[in-house]
Image: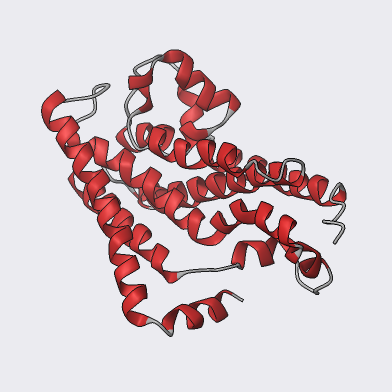
Amino acid sequence: MAWLWVRAFAQYPLSLVLMSLAVTVSVLTQVGAVVILFGHAGALAGFSVMEGLLVFGLASSAFGIADMFAGSVERLGNHIRSGTLDAMLIRPVSPLVQVAADEFSPRRLGKVVPALAILGVALSEVDVEWSAAKVGLPVLMVLSGTLICAAIWVITGCLQFFVADAREAANSLTYGGQALTEYPIAIYGQEVVRSVTYVVPLAFISWQPALLVLDRPDPLGMPEQLRYLGPVVAVLLCLCAALTWRFGLRHYRSTGS
């Protein structure tokens, strides 16, 4: 299904290239903002500019990949209003897969590729004693972060089963969460850190993994054990997303048209 959309977008190659470049420029602009901020501040929450780019790379990579494969769920309300979700329900494919694959666009690679490149540069420049146990950490961290982001996208998207115009409220948590996690979250204060750790687990996308890789204590004194829980949080949140989707789908009553 995704390949059909890729082929459709490929019919207009110049448009696809320009849109991909526009997305890439937006990522590079965000990187520039991080570099300028650290350049003026010198350090944030004890993080240097390269360590800050590590946090940015983890967050941007996870959200970029999740957006590619699950971002279309935010348009669930459009499918409900137009009645296209009803058609999806009678097809022999999971409705969630169909909604996620809808309008799958390769232009989103313009966000993922530079984010992964920045993450690779940051990992090569930060002061880390690499060992056999740490070699696989970057892949595991990006995978866990991606699953967390995708689960949040699904959970917030399910709000539209009950309030069809809840997309903007959901975006405040998804895209707003991305903006928050692109910086060391210790700069926001202990109450915010507690909220994004114990309520909405955004801290496990970039902040806790960065502390694990850099092997440094949390500036706000949060438990050290939290940095190891990223994969566990990802699995639990995906289970929660699956249950939320099933709950919403069971309470869906069609458009009536």
* Image vertical order of residue 17 relative to residue 238, above or below: below
Q: Residue 234 or 12: which is nearer the viewer?
A: 12
Q: Residue 37 or 48: which is nearer the viewer?
A: 37
> How many labels were placed on the picture?
0
Report the side of 211 relative to 94 (left or right): left
Image coords of residue 241 (percent x, y): 69, 45
Colour approach in the figure:
secondary structure
State whether residue 146 appears in this view. Answer: yes
Q: Quadrant of the C terminus?
A: bottom right
Task: Give the residue displayed 57% in from the left and 30% down from the top.
Answer: 200
Q: Residue 93 or 220: which is nearer the viewer?
A: 93
Report the side of 244 relative to 200 (left or right): right
Q: Quadrant of the N terminus?
A: bottom right
Q: Quadrant of residue 31?
A: top left
Q: Quadrant of residue 46?
A: top left
Task: Give the residue displayed 77% in from the left and 41% down from the top.
Answer: 162
Q: Residue 85 or 60: which is nearer the viewer?
A: 85
Report the side of 207 relative to 173 (left or right): left
* Image vertical order of residue 177 relative to residue 150, above or below: above
State whether residue 223 appears in this view. Answer: no
Image coords of residue 229 (percent x, y): 54, 35
Task: Give the residue displayed 61% in from the left and 46% down from the top.
Answer: 151
Report the side of 126 relative to 165 (left or right): left
